[in-house]
């Protein structure tokens, strides 16, 4: 009992921290007034109701969603006389997420039982793990994700001598087994049209009943570290970069509802911002530090189809993110790609009493503006 209480206290503190962050970022970037909305009924028997005939809320039921996806980090480095396409050895990943009322939690990993995910001599070994937190209110969206990946290979190995006679499927790729990427990714968005349900295509705590769309401004902030230091004693030099992206964007998202239960969703979100990079170059004689501030352009495209009922939901989604920036005054251009295709299935079940009690307790402890947002 003692351990359980300690866990619940930590959970409350963590949740309050993220909620406070959401409010602070909103005030800072938008100046939009805080909007309260109707009290959500807590009992399962009355938790399914319509909002302006556009949205049916099912947020007092716990959602569990399992998806198989192709989400991974991919890097491209291009110069006047070279091009590198660096990828991890991942074919498909799995993510399990839980959603209740305004909050969603998820964990992603690389299951080896999926064909193509096994470590091998051709592409090397890849280790990856990710965690996500998503908080949504009537108008606001706050996402935070943390992950790390170790082990990459050069996808266009055939372009580089002295292995010009390289044969795909037979010869091993050039590998970077000690290349590590750690990232913390966040996003804060504001939905203008309250009849458009972002939850219906993300946390699944709502159902879109009629076709609707909305403009949405976003601020995204990504911090990631890339380190190629090897355990091999033959390596004499290495580099580690610390990168911070701050991008503002505005896009449009739309959901087309077919016969109330089927939907097609699409979104296009272009953005522009800055990337600050601190590059540490480790030499035998000394370490050299270089700092750069470069403009970055980002494009995010989303497309999804699904079937969403009160108890069961399923569907497929495609999400693509491309970021491009130049390295200082050089001709080198870096590109980062995130291609995310997922097929998911989910089920909603009655929330346990302890979850209801603790969620209500968190809202009670939260500052008044946050309590209004979470009603």
Image: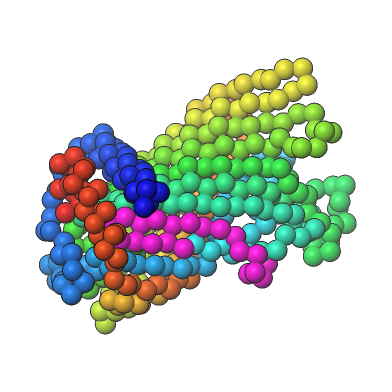
The part of the chain drawn in magenta is 96-116
Residue under the image location 78 percent in, 21 percent down: 284
Tell me what residue is drawn at x 19 percent, y 39 percent.
367
Image position of 231 with respect to 251: above or below: above
| 95 inside magenta stretch | no
User: Is 97 covered by the magenta stretch?
Assistant: yes
Q: Is residue 265 above or below residue 155?
A: below
Q: Position of residue 231 (x, y in %)?
A: 76, 37
Q: Position of residue 220 (x, y in %)?
A: 39, 43
Question: Residue 347 lies in what quarter of the image?
Answer: bottom left
- Viewport quadrant of the C terminus: bottom left
Q: Nearer the viewer, residue 217 or 109?
A: 109
Instruction: Report whether 179 appears left or right of 18.
Output: right
Q: Residue at x 18, y 75 (%)?
A: 45
- Residue 341 appears in the figure: no
Q: Quadrant of residue 265?
A: bottom left
Left or right: 93 as drawn, with respect to 249: right
Is residue 21 something that shows in the picture? yes
Tell me which residue sits at (13%, 55%) in the image: 37
Q: Residue furthest top?
A: 285
Q: Nearer the viewer, residue 213 or 23?
A: 23
Name the colouring of the figure: rainbow
Instruction: Give the percent coordinates (x, y) of residue 86.
Output: 67, 49
């Amino acid at each position: 009992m003692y351990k359980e209480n300690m866990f619940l206290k930590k959970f409350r503190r963590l949740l309050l921290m993220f909620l406070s962050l959401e409010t602070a970022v909103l005030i800072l970037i938008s100046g939009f007034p805080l909007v309260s909305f109707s009290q959500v009924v807590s009992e399962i028997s009355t938790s399914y109701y319509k909002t302006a005939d556009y949205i049916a809320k099912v947020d007092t039921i716990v959602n569990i969603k399992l998806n198989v996806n192709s989400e991974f980090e991919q890097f491209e480095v291009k110069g006047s006389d070279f091009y590198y396409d660096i990828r991890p050895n991942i074919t498909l990943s799995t993510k399990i997420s839980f959603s209740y009322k305004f909050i969603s939690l998820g964990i992603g990993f690389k299951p080896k039982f999926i064909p193509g995910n096994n470590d091998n001599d051709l592409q090397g070994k890849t280790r990856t793990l990710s965690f996500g937190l998503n908080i949504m209110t009537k108008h606001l969206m706050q996402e935070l994700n943390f992950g790390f990946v170790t082990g990459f290979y050069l996808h266009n190995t055939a372009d580089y001598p002295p292995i010009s006679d390289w044969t795909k499927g037979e010869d091993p790729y050039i590998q970077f087994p000690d290349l590590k990427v750690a990232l913390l990714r966040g996003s804060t968005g504001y939905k203008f049209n309250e009849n458009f349900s972002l939850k219906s295509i993300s946390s699944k705590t709502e159902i879109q009943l009629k076709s609707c769309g909305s403009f949405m401004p976003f601020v995204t902030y990504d911090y990631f570290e890339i380190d190629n230091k090897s355990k091999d004693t033959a390596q004499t030099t290495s580099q580690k970069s610390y990168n911070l992206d701050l991008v503002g964007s505005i896009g449009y998202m739309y959901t087309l509802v077919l016969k109330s239960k089927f939907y097609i969703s699409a979104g296009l979100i272009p953005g522009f911002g800055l990337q600050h990079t601190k590059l540490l170059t480790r030499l035998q004689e000394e370490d050299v530090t270089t700092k750069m501030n470069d403009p970055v352009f980002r494009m995010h495209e989303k497309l999804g189809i699904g079937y969403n009922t009160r108890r069961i939901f399923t569907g497929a989604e495609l999400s693509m993110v491309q970021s491009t920036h130049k390295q200082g005054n050089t001709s080198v251009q870096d590109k980062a790609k995130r291609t995310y295709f997922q097929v998911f299935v989910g089920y909603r079940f009655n929330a346990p009493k302890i979850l209801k009690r603790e969620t209500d307790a968190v809202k009670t402890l939260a500052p008044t503006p946050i309590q209004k947002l979470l009603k």
